[in-house]
Image (spheres, grey):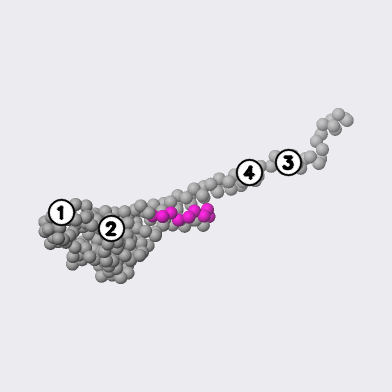
Amino acid sequence: MSGSRACRPSPRRRPLRALAADADGTTSVEFGLIAGVLFALLFGITDFGYAFWQWSSAAKALQLGVRLAAVSDPVSSDLKTYTGLSSSVLDGDPMPYYQRVCNGTSKSCSGGTFDQTALNTIVYGRGNASCPMAPQPFAPMCQIFTRIKPENVVIEYVHTGLGYAGRPGGPIPTIKLSLTGLNYDFLILNGFMGLPPISMAGLMATTTGEDLSGK
């Protein structure tokens, strides 16, 4: 009898053993760990999907904007009457090199005269000073990507060998359109993880100028 009593567990140890063997909360703990990873993954997919949408919209807006710029008054207004003629450049000679870089933020053009109305035409459409609600004959940039404002646009007109001095239709520049001061915004990851916005630098569209006239 005394030997069998010695093998019995102490009553004090029974609750501890029962607690150690209890697995009722295991599922909840495992779900909490896995759910955290799954939610983080879901938020990441959502936010980066939204960033890709912003990139796609901005790229399309640039394509439409540079197309509109090719058939509109130049933002560097001096190009409207630029012939390239001089005492050393005669009518029919190769067009001298020229370059105009116009920045909507500084409202200036390197080597030329900045025309705000011409820039508004590219961003908002012809005859508009703000983004129109109604469809336009030439879709402006703002209707594709609503965050674009004139101050977010940089446009460059540069001679790349086309045309000749004294050409009746004016110069035929290569037009490059890019964005400045815009970021990819993260709605969820910024709030939960502090992920900062990423600059949209590097987006650009290029085309060849046509008549450079809004008429």
Q: Nearer the viewer, residue 44 or 166?
A: 166
Q: Assign a secondary structure to mark 1.
A: loop
Measure the alpha-carbon separation of dots 3 and 1. 95 Å
Amino acid under disc 3:
Ala
Amino acid under disc 4:
Thr
Q: Is residue 127 above or below residue 182?
A: below
Marks 3 and 4, the one that precedes in the sequence? 3
Q: Nearer the viewer, residue 136 or 31?
A: 136
For the point 55% across and 48% down, the residue is: 36
Amino acid under disc 2:
Glu
Marks 3 and 2, the one that precedes in the sequence? 3
Instruction: Bin the neighbour count of mark 1 within 10 Å (Cα to Cα): few under 14, some 14-19, many 20 and up.
Output: some
Instruction: Bin the neighbour count of mark 4 within 10 Å (Cα to Cα): few under 14, some 14-19, many 20 and up.
Output: few
Q: Nearer the viewer, mark 3 or mark 2?
A: 2
Residue linked to disc 3: 18
State which quarter of the image contains the C terminus: bottom left
Q: Assign a secondary structure to mark 3.
A: helix
